[in-house]
Amino acid sequence: MTDDYLDKVYALKTDADRRALYDDWAAQYDDDLASQGYVTPARCAATLAASPLPKDAAILDMGCGTGLLGRALAAQGFTQIDGADVSAGMMEKARKSGVYGRLLDLSETRAPKGHYKAVAAAGVIGTGAAPPSVFDQCLDLLPKGGLFCFSFNDHTLEEPAYTDRLNAAVADGKARILSEEIGDHIKGLGSRAMVYLLERQ
Ligand SMILES: C[S@@+](CC[C@H](N)C(=O)[O-])C[C@H]1O[C@@H](n2cnc3c(N)ncnc32)[C@H](O)[C@@H]1O
């Protein structure tokens, strides 16, 4: 099933089509990803847990989906986690996880600037999910010193439209790379992802 949805998702072009696909996928997303060994949310949560971020810091899980990253963050001891997504179907599952304070529907509202001490986006910014502009949206939400933890999967690392955003943010002095680590993404598919930790400058 995961292959079917991933094949479809990488082929979609518009935000509306992607939102419809994620709404449709929501019911079986967790089972599909768990059966294939999707480890990127756990890797992002471990990266933030190893940083100096206090466990009660306000964190926004951007593109929270069904809540896999929120649950991984809660398992690492973080207590103030909000979620945001454009898919109401995915967020309905996230709500049931019980780990989120607020859940923001980005098709109707915007996340508040300067409130969150960290933004995390696992498996979100890249081909088949959010467009490159979401990279800057995440950075722009943070106050100086705020942390941004995100992943770029194999497909995305080959797309200059995405990597150029990261390189420009560093070159412009908007962000500093604290760490970047390549590792498994979806083990069953043999895919890999780079997990980055940036500090807003
Ligand atoms: C592959 S899922 C990842 C979900 C979750 N982070 C995880 O690791 O399981 C991608 C998510 O990004 C969301 N998304 C797509 N475009 C977005 C956008 N412009 N802003 C925020 N989220 C978006 C989708 O609705 C979907 O829930």
Image (cartoon, grey):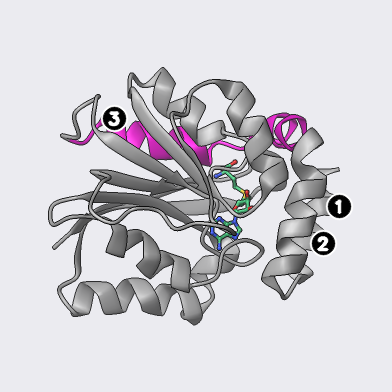
Query: Is residue 156 shown in magenta?
Result: no
Can you say which quadrant of the picture contains the C terminus?
bottom left
Task: Measure the alpha-carbon separation of dots 2 and 3.
Answer: 33 Å
**Element type where label 3 sits in the image:** helix
Please state which amino acid type lies under the numbered disc 2. Lys
189 or 160: nearer the eye?
Answer: 160
Say if mark 1 contacts mark 2, CB within 8 Å: yes
Say if mark 2 contacts mark 3, CB within 8 Å: no
Q: Which residue is mark 3?
A: 49
Q: Which residue is mark 1?
A: 4
**Element type where label 1 sits in the image:** helix
Identify the mark nearer the N-term, 3 or 1. Answer: 1
Q: Residue at image x 71%, y 74%?
A: 14
Q: Vertical placement of 15 versus 40: above or below?
A: below
Please state which amino acid type lies under the numbered disc 1. Asp
Q: How many marks are shown on the rendered structure?
A: 3
Q: Residue at image x 41%, y 66%?
A: 135
**Element type where label 2 sits in the image:** helix
Task: Measure the alpha-carbon separation of dots 3 and 1.
Answer: 33 Å
At which x and y percent is residue 73?
41, 28
Q: In this picture, which residue range is highlighted in magenta?
A: 29-51
At which x and y percent is residue 43?
43, 37
Q: Which residue is mark 2?
A: 8
Q: Quadrant of residue 53?
A: top left
At which x and y percent is residue 126?
55, 64
Task: Measure the alpha-carbon separation of dots 1 and 2.
Answer: 6 Å
Residue 114 appears in the figure: yes
